[in-house]
Image (cartoon, rainbow, N blue to C red):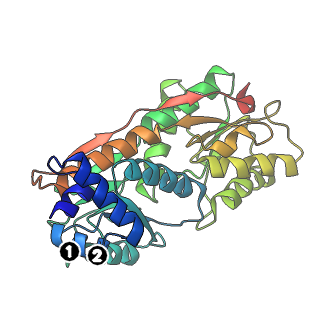
Amino acid sequence: MTVSHVINGHRNVRDETKARVLAAIAELDYQPNLAARALRRGRVGAIGLAVGHIEHAYNANLARTVTAQASALGYHVAIEATGGHLDGEVATWQRSPVFYDGLLINASQLERLPDGVRADFPVVFLGESMSDPAVDHVAMANVDGIRLATQHLLDRGCRRIAMAGGSMTTLRMVTLRTEGYVSALTCAGLPIDPALIVRTADAPPHTMGAATVATLVAAGTPFDGVVCTTDSVAHGVLRGLADAGLDCPRDVRVIGFDNLSDSNYSVPSLTSIDPHDDDLVAAALGMLIERMDGFAGPGRSITGACSLIERESTV
């Protein structure tokens, strides 16, 4: 019992006794049995993070942020890839109680609490798909962010602004960002030209961006600015502009969303919307730990703030 008190910092142990225990630990190279400790506490000390595709730059950034913040709170993080499919998201949720104390899931398909999952298992959703009021949910400022991005291009004199990756009939995140684009143009008194909203189905983000430029150029559709659903799409747009012999920002100004670190190093460096990921993750982890500690109230919903980071692509 005295050894336990020393290791866990419980109660007051005389300095002499503490020194003897620590010396014995060092001599025997004693390591606590983490599995036994987890069994006794009813906790495994791990949180799951489920994302669609681990190779996507935003998900890598999200994993880095969650891992750092969770580690500071004393939790390990295990990362799972759902493939962005409904079956993968449901399966991850179903098996999570076996492996984790709680789950953060960045879902793109799940909208309601699915059948066959434990409703009492601590889960917080990141993203925009979840609409079930029983589930905690942290979302980005999608509409406000793209509205801010579009207004920035308008303020720079752009009047034929395309949206790369936009759509009103696909994933909830995309439709919300498209709403922000439409709102800004409408408020500016500009018509909505469907030819300027371009999405190449099921393409990786960089490919989608490059294909957007190719589609607009091939169709002879004039454009002087591009709002992109993500920074990765925007990097593809920059590639597509170069391939088409167009200069950014002289011929076309470009803005992204996510403020990825790589956007500092593209040529030109990319103006982007910063969704304040650190704050979103901190809010999500706070809600998750409250659930893990026994909070059983109704679902809560938080929408984050955003800000514009101006770089060379829109000067």
Kindly indicate the quadrant of the structure image that contains residue 226. top right
Circle 1 crowding by C-alpha within 10 Å: few under 14, some 14–19, many from 20: few
Please state, as top left, top right, bottom left or bottom right, where the N terminus lies in the image. bottom left
**Residue sitting at the far right:** 245
Identity of the amino acid at label 2?
Ala
User: Does residue 133 show up?
Assistant: no
Residue with the mark numbered 1 = 39
Asked if disc 1 and disc 2 are in contact, CB closer than 8 Å, the reply is yes
Give 2 or 166, whichever is nearer the viewer: 2
Query: Can you give x and y, in whole percent of width and height, for residue 315 in the image?
Result: 74, 24
Residue 214 drawn at (x, y percent): 77, 55
Q: Residue at x 27, y 45 (%)?
A: 286
Is 226 on the left-hand or right-hand side of 84?
right
Secondary structure beneath disc 1? helix
Q: Secondary structure at mark 2?
A: helix
Q: Quadrant of residue 224?
A: top right
Task: Name the foreground residue: 179 vs 138.
Answer: 138
Q: Which residue is mark 2?
A: 35
Q: Locate residue 210, reporting x and y percent.
A: 74, 55
Q: Residue at x 39, y 46 (%)?
A: 281
Is residue 152 visible in the rendered image? The answer is yes
Q: How many angstroms separate mark 1 from mark 2 (CA)?
A: 6 Å
Q: Residue 31: where, in percent of width, then height?
A: 36, 70
